[in-house]
Amino acid sequence: MSVLDIPIRGKRSGKGGTTVQIDLPDDQAAELRLLLDGALGELSHEIADTDNPRFRQRLRDRRSALEAVARQLGPARDATVDA
């Protein structure tokens, strides 16, 4: 079982923000990690190809948020290994 603490941003969350906790079985956590790894790779390419500095910064911020979630999931492993 993996437990993720996800910070929620928004006007209502206040200065300290709000955190949502998600409990995932190991197989779902592994699938999420694979999905995040793919998205992170695509973001890196998009950041490199973007000329607009403001858009590039938004992409970097998004990458940082996704990397924080990936760190909570731990190292990637192939979800098909246990099948």
Image (tube, grey):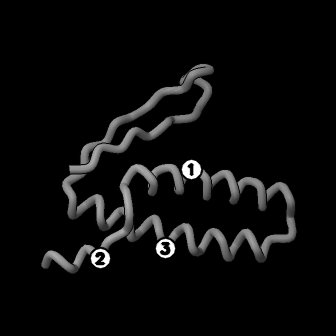
The three-letter amino acid code for the residue at tag 1 is: Ala
Q: Is residue 11 rendered to the left or right of residue 49?
A: left
Residue at left offset 76%, top offset 74%: 48
Residue at mark 2 to residue at mark 3: CA–CA distance: 13 Å
Residue 73, percent from left and from top = 36, 55
* Mark toward the start of the polypeptide (2 vs 3): 3
User: Badge 1: how crowded within 10 Å, few (<14), some, or many (20+)?
Assistant: few
Who is closer to the viewer here, 70 or 43? 70
Q: Is residue 70 rendered to the left or right of residue 14?
A: left
Q: Which mark is residue 65?
A: 1
* Mark toward the start of the polypeptide (3 vs 1): 3
Q: Which mark is residue 38?
A: 3
Residue 77, percent from left and from top = 32, 72
The three-letter amino acid code for the residue at tag 3 is: Gly
Q: Which mark is residue 24?
A: none
Above-or-below relation of 37 to 19: below
The image quarter containing residue 79 is bottom left
Q: Which residue is mark 2?
A: 78
Instruction: Give SS at disc 3.
Output: helix
Residue at left offset 61%, top offset 58%: 63
